[in-house]
Amino acid sequence: MKFSIIVPVYNEKATVAALLDRVLAAGPSDLEKEIVIVEGNSTDGTREVVRGYEGRPGVRVICEDAPRGKGAAVRAGLAAVTGDLVLVQDGDLEYSTDDYPAVLEPLRAGRCEIVFGSRTRRSVQHWQFRRYAGLERLYGFFVNLGGVLFTGLFNLLYGTRLTDGATMFKVFRGPDLKRIVLRSNGFDYDWELTAKLVRLGCRIEEVPVSYRARSRAEGKKIRFWRDGIRVALAIVRYRFSASTG
């Protein structure tokens, strides 16, 4: 089995080297590992850091000529990967690569076709797993609330029972990904991807994962109103549009 990891990065100079070193060292050791880094023409020196990983065994770097959004970067990565199992890893340190074996296990055991790493199942604050200080507490509350509302809407429309539909930690089977066409360029790609695969009959299993939320000052890119509207529209749109196209 080959395990492919797509790493879309844009303006992540502060964390990308540490993240990539952890991805390179992460298990499971019995899987062949393929890492595809998609760099979005950053303005902070991220590209120069990423280029330092070119030529390493199992690593491929794709440099975009302009930033087109996370969804577009993931599409570029999906076109390049060849693995049996595929995970998208953000270029920050919010999620731990130590959880790779746990999120891969249900797929390797054949119990499902998709695995979600649920942040709510390990957080003592449950759905309020982003906790910030000062005025940013309000931002954290609304982003947390958005995750609850969007997960509930998705469960209602698609018949799932997810606790954390907005998690980044999702693992898919490579052949399933080849059956669909993604169109979203922003953070709504996540929901489009899940929606189309669920409508094709793919089963989801959730496992608890650890999470350390970063603030906007540390580079958090989600904007509640802008991205929230796109996500809500995507969840509804892909419930009633073609399941593959």
Image (tube, rainbow, N blue to C red):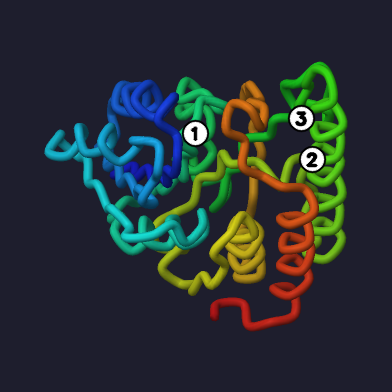
The residue drawn where x is 71% and y is 47% is 223
- Residue 10 in view of the camera: yes
Q: Tell me, for residue 143, which label it has, or none.
A: 2
Q: Is residue 235 above or below residue 241?
A: above
Q: Earlier in the sequence, mark 2 or mark 3?
A: 3
Identify the element where label 3 is drawn: loop
The numbered dot on residue 105 is: 1
Q: Which residue is mark 3?
A: 120
Rendered position, 60 above or below 30:
below
- Name the residue nearer the viewer: 136 or 238: 136
**Amino acid under disc 3:** Thr
Q: Amino acid at mark 2?
A: Val
Task: Kindly report which numbered mark, 2 or 1, lies closer to the viewer in this rendering.
Answer: 2
Q: Give the SS element for disc 1.
A: helix
Residue 158: x %, y % from top left: 78, 64
- Mark 3 crowdedness (10 Å alpha carbons): few <14, some 14-19, many ≥20: many
Q: CA distance from mark 1 to mark 3?
A: 19 Å
Residue 206: name its quadrant.
Answer: top right
Where residue 74 sits: x, y (%)? 44, 56
Of labels 2 and 3, the one closer to you: 2
Q: How many marks?
A: 3
